[in-house]
Amino acid sequence: MSPSRAPAPLLAALSDGVEVFDLGRQYAVGMPQSPNHPAYWHALPRRHGDMVRSDGGSAANDIISMGTHVGTHIDALSHVSHDGKLHGGLDAEDALTGGRYEQLGAHTIAPMVCRGVLLDVPAALGTPNGCEAGYEITRADLEATVEKQGTRPEEGDVVLVRSGWGRLFAEGAPYVGGASGVPGVGEDGARWIAEHKVRAAGADTIAFERLAPGAGHAVLPAHRVLLVESGIYIIEAMDLEELAEAGHHEFLFMLSPLALYGATGSPARPLAVVSRG
């Protein structure tokens, strides 16, 4: 078999032997998001028929504008500071060069191909409708989930925490949870995650961590623990429902952010790959 044809059987085997779960949300105008970031917008500056070539061909094209923390996205380590310091003790003011974070920007996040672990907290706690609004997912909750599932995060993994709140994404404002609050990992829970030395932590909410009713993004201690103190990336607004329903708690995780130079985050489309067997 020639070298050029050799990959075909391998690709066929992979196609037949694995199932891919898309953990990213569809980007659409009006989708729910944190009010702290510029909304997603899409328009067609050129439509079919605006210009027709001599052979009858025509093309349409797009323009989009959005914040880098809108929709499913990953936070770079430059996203959050505490007492004026970024991860590694880097002075946040000094780190900004020409309006960009050269050292800890989104362009420094390497593509991820690693073990992923889903911690299905509602399933472990016996709350099939998901965690309640404003519920804090504690260290004890995470440990109980690990014990029930038998899947403990290890160094270099990506751990995904399902609260069940993602089922509200299509409803818009209830998902944002301004008045009701949003369930998520608390400070001590974030320390539990950091102790496992994972590469990234994700969740099915817009802020990853617990938002108290009516408080919005007033304080974000889990962001401090993970991004600033531990150098662990945060992935937000994930779709974890289908993966959880299928009962997959361990899988190959894949994510590649856009190499946005100096940005504090990037849109992303994470995938979970499992064997059909």
Image (cartoon, rainbow, N blue to C red):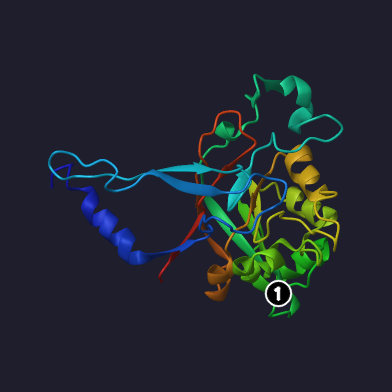
Q: Position of residue 276 (x, y in %)?
A: 40, 70
Q: Secondary structure at mark 1?
A: loop
Between residue 212 and residue 86, name the one nearer to us. 212
- Image check: 113 left or right of 241? left
User: Residue sitting at 58 percent across and 53 percent down?
Assistant: 72
- Image check: 136 left or right of 61? right
User: Residue sitting at 75 percent across and 33 percent down?
Assistant: 87
Relative to 126, does residue 19 appear above or below in the rendering?
above
Q: Quadrant of the C terminus?
A: bottom left
Between residue 234 and residue 64, name the one nearer to us. 64
User: Residue sitting at 29 percent across and 61 percent down?
Assistant: 13
Which amino acid type is shown beneath numbered disc 1? Gly
Residue at mark 1: 130
Q: Position of residue 273 (x, y in %)?
A: 46, 60
Q: Quadrant of residue 188?
A: bottom right
Q: Position of residue 123 (x, y in %)?
A: 68, 76
- Image check: 54 left or right of 39? left
Q: Quadrant of residue 249?
A: bottom right
